[in-house]
Amino acid sequence: MLAEGLVDTLYENTGLEAQRISEPQDPPEPQGAPLVVHFVREPLEMLVSAYRYLREGPRLEPWLFDHGSCGSFRCSEADWHWLFAPCKFKCSAFEILHAVETEEDGLHITYRLIRAEISRMLSTIRAWAFSPRVLHVSVGSFRGDPAGAR
């Protein structure tokens, strides 16, 4: 179970002010582009999903074995240092995730890996919030009663 402090930290630190060092400018509104469907995930669900995926599916992500790599998550420089400085950048995310003793520690490490990704998603929501060319769709909208769908 997630510790309440980690949940609070997740929501507090995904604010754009907390992410200033790793965030580029807000994405430009899609002018003249085709209509855009922007899929949005609940940050806490995204964290737990990423943790489970990275713990169980490393063969699908070769970067997990690269020393000092955050892979496609493109973590911030501060998070990169936090993750890899203790091992002098000679360990992989896979090694770090499998060295922790508790699930809470594993979630905290995963959070550091994906924090910039969550922030980019929230930044895109803010930048495109009122665009008539963008439809924001929650991944949770697809949950339901598949047998009842006709």
Image (cartoon, rainbow, N blue to C red):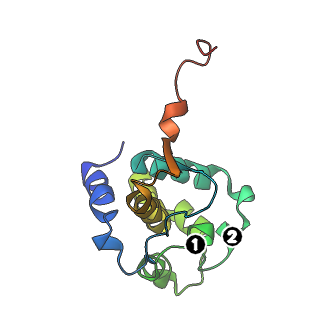
The quarter of the rendered structure image containing the N terminus is top left
- Would residue 91 appear left or right of 124 to someone viewing this image? right
Instruction: Give the residue type that dot 1 points to.
Output: Cys
Where does the image place residue 94, in percent across and percent down from the top left?
Answer: 61, 65
Q: Are marks 2 and 1 in contact (CB under 8 Å)?
A: yes
Looking at the image, which residue is at 48% across and 36% down? 140
Mark 2 Cα-neighbour bin, 10 Å: few <14, some 14–19, many ≥20: some
Q: Residue at x 60, y 62 (%)?
A: 32
Residue 70, label in figure: 1
Q: Observer-nearest residue: 111 or 43?
A: 43
Residue 8 at x, y = what percent? 25, 54
**Distance from the alpha carbon under mark 2 to that under mark 1:** 7 Å
Residue type, numbered disc 2: Trp
Residue farthest to the front, as pictured: 32
User: How far from the left and from the top, in percent, is residue 50?
Assistant: 54, 53
Q: In this orientation, does residue 101 appear? A: no
Residue at image coords 64%, 49%: 56
- First in sequence, mark 2 or 1: give its number: 2
Residue at 68% x, 52% y: name it: 57
From this viewpoint, is residue 3 visible?
yes
In the image: residue 59, left or right of residue 118: right
- Residue in the foreground of this view, choosing between 7 and 13: 13
92 sits to left or right of 42? right
Disc 1 is placed on an element classified as loop
Is residue 46 or residue 149 the one in the foreground?
Answer: 149
Q: Secondary structure at mark 2?
A: helix
Q: Quadrant of the C terminus?
A: top right
Q: Which mark is residue 63?
A: 2
Task: Give the percent coordinates (x, y) of residue 30.
Answer: 55, 63
